[in-house]
Image (cartoon, coloured by chain):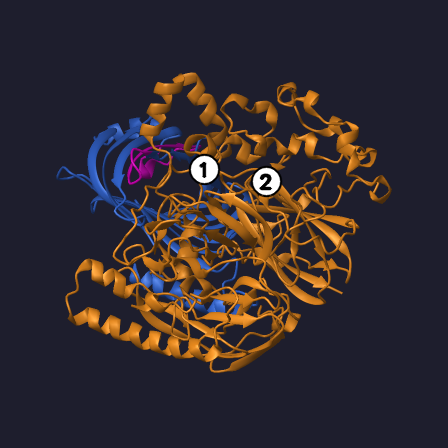
Amino acid sequence: MKNFKSPIHTLALVATAFGSSFVYAEAQDDPLLTSVMIDQLEKGVQSGDATRVSAQAWLGYDLNKLWLKVDSEYTNSDEQDLEIQALYSHAIAPYWNVQMGVRQDTKPTPTRHWAVLGVQGLAPYFFDIDAALFVGEEGRTALRLSVEQDWLITQRLILTPEFEINAYSKKDETINIGSGLSDISAGLRLRYEITRKFAPYIGLDWSQKLGNTADLVRSDGESTGDTQFVVGVKAWF
Amino acid sequence: MTQSKSPLDRSNKQAQPAFANKVLSRRQFVFGASAILALTTIPFSKNALANTMAQSLTPLSGKVFELTIDYKTVNITGEPARATVINQLLPGPLLRWKEGDTVTLRVKNNLDHDTSLHWHGMILPTGMDGVPGLSFKGIKPGETFEYQFPVKQSGTYWYHSHSGFQEQTGAYGAIVIDPEEADPVVFDREHVVMLSDWSNEAPESIYANLKKQSDYYNYHERTMSDLFSDIKTQGLVNTWKARSMWNQQRMSDRDISDVTGATYTYLMNGNSPAQPWQALFKAGEKVRLRVINSSAMTIFDVRIPGLKMTVVASDGQNIQPVIVDEFRIGVAEVYDVIVEPEVDNAYCFFAQSIDRSGYAIGNLTSDYALSAKVPTMDPMPILTHGDMGMNMEHMDHSKMPMGEGAMQGMDHSKMPMGEGAMQGMDHSKMPMGEGAMQGMDHSKMPMSEDAMQGMDHSKMPMGVLGVAGYGSNSDIKHLDSESGPQVDMRVDTPKSGLNDPGIGLRDHQEKYHRKVLTYADIKGLHATRDTRQPSREIQLHLTGNMDRYMWSINGIKFADSEPLELTYGERLRITLINDTMMIHPMHLHGMWSELETGDPDYIPRKHTVMVQPGSKISYLVTADALGQWAYHCHLLYHMPGMFRKVVVK
């Protein structure tokens, strides 16, 4: 992370130096900022459970940002997922950003590439939404919707239910994806914000393969559903 | 003991020789330094420590001042942190001027960055106003800038850096100007009370944190237990109804302060509550307290349990005395109050932050051995639908804190209802449901001759503009620029901010029998100087997106804005409409903001005016100062965006 941050920092400093036309400030109203958000860094408590990382990083201004999203799951060398999205995020409404760019699924192999068009923002009733359409090679398309909400038990103890669903237009047998709804997952994580930026948590993560995808997975002799108790940390800077 | 010879102790008529102050200030400084030294080596009892450590402001008086701005490591919270200080002091020295003098201030910059000093509330030539980019180029590192201007006013003011976020880190100080003629305010003793907020975090980090998570410092958010208790007391259906508006709007009714006691330590004359500031009085004295809010972000509610306060000046300008128990002081505002303790005792000067996340305290005592009890803070304010400027139809009147204040916008009895004025009011366009109209008691409308007598119809502008002194009655218009991702709220039916004590204070009269100052109580001591009617009205909407932490005026941030152009000599009205849920203390440089509080003959002059959430307020301006001036929200982290250049030509 340190290596990742430093070039961005340097870039930010350089850009700030060139961009500072407003001497009232040096405090510009809209400085170039960077953020790295580790939403989930967690391990299932049972041996053989996966280690998961879900992180985002951005560089930019109030309304326009370059945005990275990384999702990774590692059980063992045969069983791993790594997905990276590089996006341009543009504010279109008070609570909504349009995000477009590319996604690369490095693991499992073979690598898949997608173009991304998504919306991310805060819906009424404080639902955090991330919805995206992915357009891949050979006419493959996919949809993903994830929703989460923070429930404050106290000012620092926060319960976060979350939900994600994926769908694919076309079968991709080599990586065990069937057409139609492919998987659904739900989580319930209880974190304690020691500081705003650092919060360890415990949680329950449930996932289920669906439809044709479930059939493919089953025919490989793997399980189609999984429930894990997880411990992890959420952090950002 | 520094306080025992407070240089501000003086009789009203006898001016202190300048040299005495200087001698005293040097002594005080040396004493302060040795006290800090002593602290590290000698174990003091806690009480003795408090007395030794409490600092008063260090006064400098005369006509020529040498000021240097430096970094300095200070320890306010128990951890060292870097401050920006003036003459090695936090707050900077108290500058004592005399009306009629010309003062010279040589300001040396020992920082790595540009700096500046702005003389807040002073009427002076534009080049001396100290706003980099508008008045001058700023003071470069290592350079000295000489300010020189005639002092044409008296009262309590303050000064601060107008560069970057230096103000947050300590670059501020008080100004007291003695009047040329006899002071109409009679007092035996005076103390300056400078309130501020201190954080060990760098201000740039605070700003970045807010941009990344706007409720970063808010540890008073609604929790599930609040929800359950609401359901228990109000039932599920009512709770759902009450919550649904906030939830649909994606806003929090607990969003009171952007930056809170989670990072701030609130200071009084530079002293934290752990080492309260102390000040002496003798029983029977009239004690003048010059209260200045030099915070970056904190609005305070001030009271002294056991003492009535007579407010005698607002923003340095004398007003008709108002006796209150409590007043709210916005960032950059100034109030002078007189207290008259009748017996020897100790009183707590208590300034709680508006969100009740902390307080600054001082001990006002007849004897340093006596310490006043610190009161508990009042409950945290919770925003109402009315603070969102919600259409009245949807409001539950029974639960709204609708005193006269909130209804003021509809209080026709106070409106000069000539035909001219009536023309400006188009009731058909007022978005009022029948429900709202029921709240208006037309039977009490004094459309009688009595009410009309005070009005000279011949002088009234028979157009849409409201009469000078009474505020605006123009339609609320939102510009196209108010739409977009930078604006999260627009208020169509703002209430009047004049009679409203404000969030968290509305029930204090009823609940605690505390009279709270409102803007409607403030009338100038002297007759209105410029009695012309406004020739035009500028309507400005204070806008923002809390979630993205973006602030603007009319939806346009300063960087993208055109200057507001005023014609030299013109008399105009500025009407501010707060399209956000936060109070914005708006500060116009160079010219007075003459707040229309309902008496055209005694319009008070202010330099900073709080605009309450979902409310509107109007003031008159005489554009009598050529040049370029700043006009902005004085909340430091709103200022970069919620800012306009004003050009008078």
Residue pointed to by mark 2: B497
Q: Which chain is orange?
A: B
Q: Is residue A158 magenta?
A: yes
Quarter that holds the C terminus of chain B: bottom right
Q: Is residue B286 above or below residue B306?
A: below
Please name the residue shown 55% across and 37% down the image.
Answer: B500
Chain letter for blue?
Answer: A
Measure the alpha-carbon separation of dots 1 and 2.
19 Å
User: Quick one: label 1 or label 2, which is nearer the N terminus?
Assistant: 2
Q: Residue B203: where, in percent of width, then height? A: 41, 60
Judging from the image, mark 2 belongs to the subunit labelled: B
Q: Which residue is mark 1?
A: B514
Q: Looking at the picture, which amino acid does disc 1 mark? A: Arg
Specify start and end residues of the magenta stretch as a single range: A152-177
Residue at image coords 44%, 58%: A33
Query: Does B218 appear in magenta?
Result: no
**What chain does mark 1 sit on?**
B
